[in-house]
Image: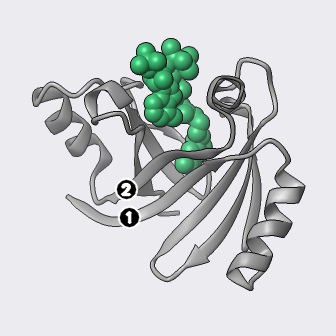
Amino acid sequence: MFTNLEHLGLAVHDLEAATALYSALLNQEPYKQEHVASEGVDTVFFRVGGSKIELLAGTTPDSAITRYLTKKGEGIHHVAFEVADIRATMARLKEQGFTLLNEEPKRGADNKLVCFVHPKSAAGVLVELCQEIVQ
Ligand SMILES: CC[C@H](C(=O)O)C(=O)SCCNC(=O)CCNC(=O)[C@H](O)C(C)(C)COP(=O)(O)OP(=O)(O)OC[C@H]1O[C@@H](n2cnc3c(N)ncnc32)[C@H](O)[C@@H]1OP(=O)(O)O
Ligand SMILES: [Co+2]
């Protein structure tokens, strides 16, 4: 079950400059900065109501964000939905013919298990599924 629009992921060239810009725009400081080595990204998170803005900068040449920025420049990179049971959702989507980009949930940012749906399966939008990791 999809329970919330968890975050919008924005790809940016300069994380420090983008953080200052979004701090001014949203009139708040970010609640978290996190490096996700497995994705080759540095992230910064802002809360907006029940959702979040995730700023992402690539830290390696082969990072998905670095590749995206090279090809498309800055902008909305993905939309993330919170799901109650990521494995059940992945199984349902696979059954329905959606292309998943990882076979198993993987550790994402902000204490989540994540899985991505190929944009070709979602009318040109990269979709991320997120399930909170309960400690
Ligand atoms: C996990 C930490 C954090 C979190 O919230 O927890 C994150 O969100 S990390 C976010 C970064 N990680 C990822 O995005 C992982 C999943 N992404 C991928 O596996 C790739 O980026 C992929 C497969 C979506 C695209 O790979 P690549 O760029 O190498 O392929 P192409 O350039 O050939 O693209 C294929 C096709 O897809 C279109 N495309 C690519 N990226 C996007 C996008 N973000 N949104 C929409 N469409 C996208 C691209 O234009 C190509 O289409 P075509 O019509 O053939 O030009
Ligand atoms: Co994300």
Residue ID for mark 2 = 81
Amino acid carrying mark 1 in the image: Leu
Q: Between disc 2 and disc 1, whose residue precedes?
A: 1
Coordinates of residue 130 in the picture (x, y in percent): 42, 52
Picture quadrant of residue 119: top left
Residue ID for mark 1 = 5
Coordinates of residue 48 in the picture (x, y in percent): 55, 78
Amino acid carrying mark 2 in the image: Phe
Can residue 108 be seen?
A: no
Judge the density around disc 2: few (<14), some (14-19), many (≥20) Cα neighbours within 10 Å.
many
Picture quadrant of residue 73: top right
Secondary structure at badge 2 equals strand
Judge the density around disc 1: few (<14), some (14-19), many (≥20) Cα neighbours within 10 Å.
some
Coordinates of residue 2 in the picture (x, y in percent): 25, 59
Is the CB atom of the residue marked by disc 1 within 8 angstroms of ligand 2's nearest atom? no
Q: Is residue 1 shown left or right of residue 48? A: left
Cβ atoms under marks 2 and 1 closer than 8 Å: yes
Please give the name of the residue rendered at 28% of the width and 41% of the height, measured from the top-left corner: 87
Q: Is residue 2 shown left or right of residue 13? A: left
What separation in Å lies between label 2 and label 1 (alpha carbons)?
5 Å
Picture quadrant of residue 27: bottom right
Secondary structure at badge 1 equals strand
